[in-house]
């Protein structure tokens, strides 16, 4: 059985000592990350999940990125890529690739635009 710390937990002095100890030993635990830091963290977690072949977890982190930044075209493309290459849900992949194509322009020479076009062509070739 664990040893218990004696004392009244509702005592303000005890609470203050407890909180100051927590702040001292876990200084970064109380900082709210900024939105761009969260997106970077979610992108890293997405890549880790994909490397571990945890496709459902990877989709969760892509959805979290899109919740914070609905205009993140790279996250949309990656989501389409998962539906295409991992889940083989071609109608869903085509829908997402179409969104990426609408949001990017061919004139700008966007790499994502070219990749989405190539993926769409690959799906169409497989389905024909």
Image (cartoon, rainbow, N blue to C red):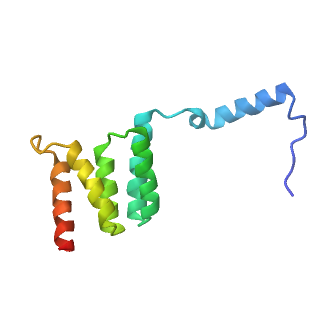
Quarter of the image for residue 51 reads bottom left
Name the residue located 46 percent from the left edge and 54 percent from the top edge. Answer: 60
- Asked if residue 107 lies left or right of residue 64, the reply is left
Quarter of the image for residue 32 reads top right
Name the residue located 65 percent from the left edge and 37 percent from the top edge. Answer: 25
In x, y percent, where is residue 79?
34, 55
In x, y percent, where is residue 9?
86, 35
Above or below, comparing residue 37 to residue 63 in the picture:
above
Q: Quadrant of the N terminus?
A: bottom right
In x, y percent, where is residue 122?
18, 66
Name the residue located 32 percent from the left edge and 50 percent from the top edge. Answer: 76
Above or below, comparing residue 67 to residue 12 in the picture:
below
- Asked if residue 109 lies left or right of residue 34, the reply is left
Above or below, comparing residue 97 to residue 25 in the picture:
below
Quarter of the image for residue 8 reads top right
Name the residue located 33 percent from the left edge and 69 percent from the top edge. Answer: 88
Q: Quadrant of the C terminus?
A: bottom left
In x, y percent, where is residue 111?
17, 49
Above or below, comparing residue 114 to residue 19 in the picture:
below
Tell which of 37 and 73 is nearer to you: 73
- Asked if residue 16 lies left or right of residue 5, the reply is left
């Amino acid at each position: 059985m664990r040893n218990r710390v004696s004392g009244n937990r509702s005592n303000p002095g005890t609470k203050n000592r407890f909180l100051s100890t927590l702040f001292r030993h876990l200084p970064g635990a109380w900082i709210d990350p900024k939105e761009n830091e969260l997106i970077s963290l979610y992108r890293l977690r997405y890549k880790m999940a994909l490397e571990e072949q945890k496709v459902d977890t990877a989709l969760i982190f892509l959805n979290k990125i899109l919740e914070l930044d609905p205009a993140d075209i790279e996250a949309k493309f990656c989501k389409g890529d998962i539906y295409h290459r991992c889940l083989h849900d071609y109608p869903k992949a085509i829908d997402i690739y179409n969104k990426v194509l609408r949001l990017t322009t061919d004139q700008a020479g966007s790499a994502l635009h070219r990749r989405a076009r190539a993926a769409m062509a690959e799906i169409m070739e497989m389905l024909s």
